Image (tube, rainbow, N blue to C red):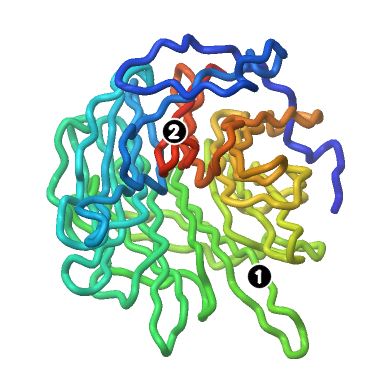
């Protein structure tokens, strides 16, 4: 793998400690966070956003204006009839305090794996749900900064077996992608779009070519959208490998048009895996954790500086070989990464940042650094800092933890 200094995207970014004052949240202290090392002083306290004995998992975070929104999946009912609903908490002061949780799904079915996006006062949430007797993609929105939300509606339009739903928004556009599954087509990637802030959605259409495709991810910027996904390849007498594919689309009027060019991002014998895509200005950032060889799950990233038309060389992001669940975000010329890793005695959440035109690798920071299993991180930025959430079982059950610090 080439690591020319021209292409390495990391440069040291100073992180300043943020005041630990919070409301409606429990501070989780660890012995390591009490140490007086310089690195420990860079990181703010960790806040428990759920504080209950239920099973709270799969958090996602988004921000707009001075607001920060966290959604997650949480168990409801008795232990015997355990079910899950989608909850949201809102902060109107950039993460200093949070309002009480609100149940967005609140139904008899199993609601799972929420995703969230926000633009100005418009907040959009999607998840999978089987209340109707079949699995569907549900969608709801707020037009008043998260004070109220519409009733959830199905937008998967009878696509078979939808799952792995992802969401992006830009201007008045809302883009939703997911996996569809049936016995003939196997796994395919499906897309629908709204041009009127989620009031109506267009037809569902397939993105990609063929089956064995999974884990679609989407970002939107300007009048374009960017999708990355996995495709399994199983050549005769060879171990099944994963291609990481990418396509760029753009809007013309009220329709979406994919660019003809379908790009394979993982080359140089680097295996693909579940990815994340982010976009800002002309920059498109792709990160993923490799699936092969077994036990060598590295984090990789690629950057495009011309709107996804082509990508620079692949960069090896982390030194551990037990990485998973990487997420990224890019703002102006700075890229931020969080991922789950097994480096010490358990799973922790790690962070790295850097300037996309820089030359120096940045320090990796352990954000969770506790005795429990920390997993499934999500990241966003606002004008006052970087916001990260993850799922954690340090308290004895799964809770949603939150951390903020200035950048």
Q: Which residue is disc 2 drawn over?
A: 401
| 314 shown above or below 343 | below
Q: Quadrant of the C terminus?
A: top right
The quadrant in which residue 221 appears is top left
Badge 2: few (under 14), some or many (20 or more) residues near its Cα, within 10 Å?
Answer: many
Name the residue that disc number 1 marks.
242
Say which of 70 and 220 sits in front. 70
Q: Quadrant of residue 193?
A: bottom left
**Dot 1 crowding, Cα within 10 Å, few <14, some 14–19, many 20+:** many
Percent coordinates x, y for residue 332 in the rendering: 56, 28
Q: Is residue 1 left or right of residue 261?
A: right
Looking at the rendered structure, the secondary structure element under dot 2 is strand
**Location of residue 205 in the rendering, given as x and y in whole percent from the top left corner:** 36, 71
Label 2 near label 1: C-beta < 8 Å?
A: no
Residue appearing at x 59%, y 12% in the figure: 16
Q: Nearer the viewer, residue 103 or 337?
A: 103
């Amino acid at each position: 793998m080439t690591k020319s200094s021209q292409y390495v995207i990391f440069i040291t970014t100073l992180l300043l400690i943020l005041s630990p004052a919070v409301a409606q949240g429990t501070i989780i202290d660890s012995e390591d966070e009490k140490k007086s090392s310089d690195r420990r002083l860079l990181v703010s306290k960790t806040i428990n956003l759920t504080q209950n004995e239920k099973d709270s998992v799969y958090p996602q975070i988004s921000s707009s204006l001075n607001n920060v929104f966290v959604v997650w999946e949480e168990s409801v009912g008795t232990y015997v009839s355990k079910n899950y609903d989608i909850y949201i908490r809102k902060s109107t002061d950039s993460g200093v305090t949070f309002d009480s949780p609100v149940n967005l799904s609140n139904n008899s079915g199993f609601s799972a794996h929420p995703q969230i996006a926000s633009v100005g006062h418009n907040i959009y949430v999607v998840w999978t749900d089987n209340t109707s007797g079949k699995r569907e993609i549900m969608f709801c929105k707020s037009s008043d900064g998260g004070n109220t939300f519409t009733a959830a509606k199905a937008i998967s339009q009878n696509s078979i077996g939808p799952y792995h739903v992802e969401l992006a928004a830009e201007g008045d556009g809302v883009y939703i992608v997911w996996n569809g599954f049936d016995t003939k087509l196997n796994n395919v990637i499906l897309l629908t779009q709204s041009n009127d802030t989620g009031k109506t959605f267009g037809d569902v259409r397939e993105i990609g070519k063929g089956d064995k495709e999974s884990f679609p991810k989407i970002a939107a910027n300007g009048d374009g959208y960017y999708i990355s996904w996995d495709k399994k390849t199983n050549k005769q007498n060879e171990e099944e490998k994963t291609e990481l594919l990418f396509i760029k689309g753009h809007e013309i009027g009220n329709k979406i048009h994919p660019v003809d060019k379908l790009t394979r991002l993982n080359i140089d014998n680097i295996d693909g895996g579940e990815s994340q895509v982010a976009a800002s200005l002309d920059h498109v950032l792709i990160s993923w954790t490799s699936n092969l060889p077994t036990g060598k799950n590295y984090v990789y990233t690629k950057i495009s500086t011309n709107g996804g038309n082509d990508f620079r060389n692949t960069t090896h992001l982390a030194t551990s070989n037990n990485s998973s669940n990487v997420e990224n975000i890019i703002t102006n010329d700075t890229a931020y990464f969080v991922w789950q890793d097994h480096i010490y005695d358990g799973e922790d959440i790690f962070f790295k940042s850097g300037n996309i035109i820089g030359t120096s690798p940045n320090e990796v920071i352990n954000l969770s650094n506790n005795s429990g299993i920390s997993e499934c991180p999500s990241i966003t930025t606002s004008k006052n800092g970087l916001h990260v959430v993850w799922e954690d079982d340090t308290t004895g059950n799964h809770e949603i933890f939150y951390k903020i610090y200035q950048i």
